[in-house]
Image (spheres, rainbow, N blue to C red):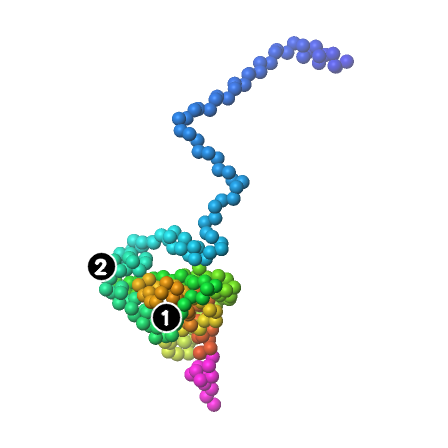
Amino acid sequence: MQLPLVLHCLGHLPELQIPLLQPPLPPRRSSCNPAPRRAYWLPGKPLLNPHNEQDDANHADAEFQPVEFTNSVFGPDPHNYKSAMNALDTDRWREACNTEISTLIANGTWELVELPQDAKVVQSGWVFKVKLNPDNTVERYRSKLVAKGYSQRPGYDYTEVFAPTFQPASLRLITALAAKEGFKMHSVDISSAFTYGELDEVIYIKQPEGYYQGGPNVVYKLHKLLYGLKQSARQWNKKLHSVLDHPFFPSNYHHG
């Protein structure tokens, strides 16, 4: 009985006004030519040559950008040998380089040899730094000959690189024990510490800029470590541990 009544009421409803949707505006034309879409499915050009470590090192050197620190009192330190030799204080930098080379030679760090045919050479470089006193006066000019460890090959030029590191909690513990027991504490600064570590692998490095000797294939065969090698920290820790653990070291004396 209710269905005819509903139909009768629907017959008297006003007609619904459905607004028509406007079509979207056409895109604006630009006078600039759009950039072509990159073919993302194609492999990109590699940055480095995976089969030539020499090209890799040269490419990394070319991409190097020096960083200048704004809080330096005497201006930015030279970022390479050429900059140091063209600086106003070039005599001080040359003296620092001569001191570094003389120290490494006296330590028996390397010997001059011809690069074997199938051997790879590790790049070398200079690091320059002006050390200042607390009153911002110059303490000394320091130059360090380093090896560029990024050109080393894992499995050939190095194997293990782990070395234990110092924790601030250890220093606080030692200081607290010394204060409680009334001990005197002394600090030791070992200059060029890493160069005293002994090298297990056979590594050839390029002669440093400004100190070339012999022909183009003459390189340094390392007997001791240099800063920058990936295994330097580990080998120095092993060297220091062997000295401190020696039975004739004063800390191992047993008083009866």
Q: Residue 30: x percent and y percent?
A: 41, 26
**Quadrant in the picture for the N terminus:** top right
Circle 2 residue: 88
Secondary structure state at the residue bearing disc 2: loop
| Residue at mark 2 to residue at mark 1: CA–CA distance | 27 Å
Q: What range of the chain is rendered magenta?
A: 245-256
How far from the left and from the top, in percent, is residue 153? 48, 61
Report the magenta stretch's main SS.
loop
63 lies above or below 3: below
Q: Mark number for residue 172? A: none
Q: Which residue is more in the foreground, 118 or 22?
A: 118
Quarter of the image where one finds residue 196: bottom left
Residue 192, labelled with which disc? 1
Give the percent coordinates (x, y) of residue 131.
29, 64
Q: Circle 1 — which element?
A: loop
Disc 2 crowd, CA 10 A, few/some/many (<14, 14-19, 20+): few
Q: Residue at x 31, y 63 (%)?
A: 210
Describe residue 87's horizontal placement relative to residue 173 as left or right: left
- The residue carrying pointer 1 sits among few (fewer than 14), some (14 to 19) or many (20 or more) residues within 10 Å by Cα, namely few
Instruction: Kindly give the residue lying farthest to the left in the view shown.
Output: 88
**Residue 88 lies within the magenta run:** no
Give amino acid for label 1.
Ser
In front here: 253 or 14? Answer: 253
Q: Amino acid at mark 2?
A: Leu
Asked if residue 30 can be seen in this view, the reply is yes
Give yes or no for residue 246 being in the magenta stretch: yes
- Residue at 34 percent across and 54 percent down: it is 66
- Residue drawn at (36%, 52%) of the image: 65
Total number of numbered discs in the rendering: 2
In the image, residue 9 sits, relative to residue 209, either above or below, namely above
